[in-house]
Image (cartoon, rainbow, N blue to C red):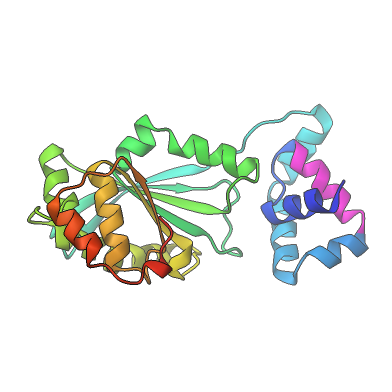
Amino acid sequence: VTPRRCSAACVATATSSECTRTFLLCILNPHFYIKILSFEKALLIFYNFIIHYDTISLQLREGVTYVDKGTVKDITFFSESLQEHIQLLIYIPANYTPLYKYNILIASDGKDYFQLGGIPRLADELIDDYEIEHLIIVGVAYKSVEDRKRKYIPSGDQHEAYLRFLAHELVPYLDEEFSTNTLGSYRGLIGDSMAATVSLLAAIKYPNIFGKAILHSPYVDDLVIEKVRNAVHWDLLSI
């Protein structure tokens, strides 16, 4: 076990069979274990080992390798800004524990990302392979094509209210409901077409709340260009 691999396993926690073996080898080397882990991380590893003990034991006996699956909560959230109920799909990773702080990714066009794009399955695989950090993904569903236009582009009559909903209602709810990193640099927005546009515009309007934006083929018109040109604090954003 190399130091790099051992460190990655301990930070990511042990849930798959490969990670379990590495995790146990880390424990069997107390000097190295203490050196690479803070008390908080050590406690997190021990907690995960206890709650997954039966699964870990079975994996070690049978040599079974599989990707642990997170869960998806389907909830209805009432927005004061929009004065309507909104469907939220919330992906919670399999290794979730309140002892750790999780990054947040908010997806407009949320149901498309969850049902058509398979984002929960992809997140499971990337977390299991240590490709991404601990992450909670929130899909914000739209009601219709017309609803997307009203909320996602600057000319829509609900556009500003939707931006307020994202920044001042959804984020506080997530920070209260889950163990999250509360700095903007740990929150991201993602969307496709018009949803990419609203992700960008939310980030440039609230750069201290949303530090990252992933844009898939964003919709652009003169109003969007004007808002981008007038934006400041680009140094706070990663697009």
Q: Residue at x 47, y 66 (%)?
A: 185
Is 25 magenta? The answer is yes
| Quadrant in which the C terminus appears | bottom left
Q: Is residue 39 left or right of residue 132?
A: right
- For the stretch drawn in magenta, the main secondary structure is helix
Give how far across and how far down residue 222 sits, in percent: 13, 52
Decide which of 80, 103 is in the foreground and name it: 103
Decide which of 117, 153 is in the foreground and name it: 153
Q: Quadrant of residue 116?
A: top left
Which residues lie in the magenta part? 18-29
Residue 69: tell me if it is visible.
no
Q: Residue at x 39, y 33 (%)?
A: 117
Decide which of 89, 127 is in the foreground and name it: 127
Q: Residue at x 30, y 64 (%)?
A: 204
Decide which of 78, 181 is in the foreground and name it: 181
Q: How many marks?
A: 0
Q: Is residue 47 left or right of residue 212?
A: right
Q: Is residue 166 left or right of residue 39?
A: left
Give how far across and how far down residue 130 sits, in percent: 65, 46
Is 198 magenta? The answer is no
Residue 52: tell me if it is visible.
yes
Give how far across and how far down residue 216 sits, in percent: 34, 41
- For residue 72, above or below residue 62: below
Q: Is residue 56 left or right of residue 79?
A: right
Give how far across and how far down residue 36 sits, in percent: 80, 64
Q: Quadrant of residue 157?
A: bottom left
Q: Quadrant of residue 31?
A: bottom right
